[in-house]
Amino acid sequence: MIPDAPVLNLNGYTSLPPGKIAAVVTYLEMSARPRLKTVPRRDDWILERIRSDLPRYRALFRRVGEPWLWFSRAVMPEAALAAILANPDVEALILRDSSGDIGLLELDFRDAGQCKLQFFGVVPEAVGIGAGRHLIREGIRRAFRRRGTAKSVARFVLHTCSLDHPAALPFYLKAGFKAVRRAIEVADDPRITGHLAPTAAPHIPVIQPKAIRPRRAPSARGGVHR
Ligand SMILES: CC(C)(COP(=O)(O)OP(=O)(O)OC[C@H]1O[C@@H](n2cnc3c(N)ncnc32)[C@H](O)[C@@H]1OP(=O)(O)O)[C@@H](O)C(=O)NCCC(=O)NCCS
């Protein structure tokens, strides 16, 4: 065991070293294609598959994900990302309107028998206009469309975490996914490692490893307890 490594308390709080972020991850799945309802869509919404335009993909990934501390694809080496997008079993789709790219839907069929919603979201300006609903309906349709073929899918899976948009988990539940598992994810804060701008996600304060905290006089009151 690493000396002084924090031990996860399964019935209480676990302190983390400064510089770490933590999230509760919820895994969800859909084991059969639901009856797809018709959802309203704007006439100028166009869905395009992206296979090789890495700058366009990265720009959209950053706009959708940076407010929620997504960084994995932003830092992925060019060759690795190019190989994923070119893989015939990965469908990275961009939703655009007359203003430009507004949403990302990435489906991964590389594991036999399942489809994984790898990345999903809309840019901040498009939250709440129905684009998410339109995109997830399209995701569900595509995930199960290989029924009856050798590449048939039995489960459509995804995970979302407490760092994502607060509407994300209820959104997936309303779309018909069921929660099946939870995990705790701890990572280096990508704003400290330099993978994301220090100004990203200001609602989640950065706690620097060597923060110089002002000394406070001892107080008679106890600590704050949520
Ligand atoms: C999560 C996110 C996609 C939700 O999108 P949104 O813009 O809030 O949602 P929309 O306006 O498109 O539609 C929401 C409504 O569609 C409903 N809906 C979702 N799927 C549906 C479906 N398949 N059929 C019918 N209705 C559906 C929702 O329940 C919600 O209904 P309500 O009005 O009763 O609340 C959006 O907040 C987002 O992209 N956030 C940033 C990135 C992120 O956190 N992504 C998730 C990471 S896992």
Image: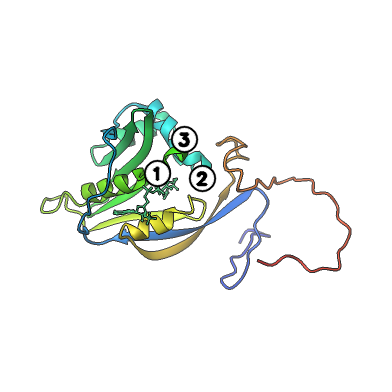
Q: Secondary structure at mark 2?
A: helix
Circle 1 packing at 10 Å, graded few (<14), some (14-19), many (20+), is many
Circle 2 packing at 10 Å, graded few (<14), some (14-19), many (20+), is many
Q: Quadrant of residue 108?
A: top left
Horizontal relation, residue 110 to residue 9: left or right: left
- Quarter that holds the C terminus: bottom right
Dot 3 and dot 1 residues touching (CB under 8 Å): no
Q: Which residue is label 2 attached to?
A: 68
Q: Which residue is label 1 attached to?
A: 121
Dot 3 and dot 2 residues touching (CB under 8 Å): no
Horizontal relation, residue 34 to residue 83: left or right: left
Mark earlier in primary sequence (1, 2): 2
For the residue marked with disc 1, what is the amino acid?
Gly
Dot 1 and dot 2 residues touching (CB under 8 Å): yes
Q: Nearer the viewer, residue 27 or 131?
A: 131
Is residue 110 in view?
A: no
- Quarter that holds the N terminus: bottom right
Q: CA distance from mark 3 to mark 1?
A: 10 Å
Q: In the image, residue 203 lies at what x, y percent?
A: 60, 47
Q: Which residue is drawn at the image coordinates 13% and 50% (left, top)?
A: 150
Q: Which residue is drawn at the image coordinates 41% and 39% (left, top)?
A: 126
Q: In the image, residue 224 lies at what x, y percent?
A: 72, 65
Q: CA distance from mark 3 to mark 2?
A: 10 Å
For the residue marked with disc 2, what is the amino acid?
Trp
Q: In the image, residue 190 lies at what x, y percent?
A: 57, 41
Relative to 179, residue 144 above or below: above
Mark earlier in primary sequence (3, 2): 3
Q: Is ligand 1 within 8 Å of the beta carbon of the residue shown at mark 1?
A: yes
Q: CA distance from mark 1 to mark 2?
A: 10 Å
- Image disc number at residue 63: 3
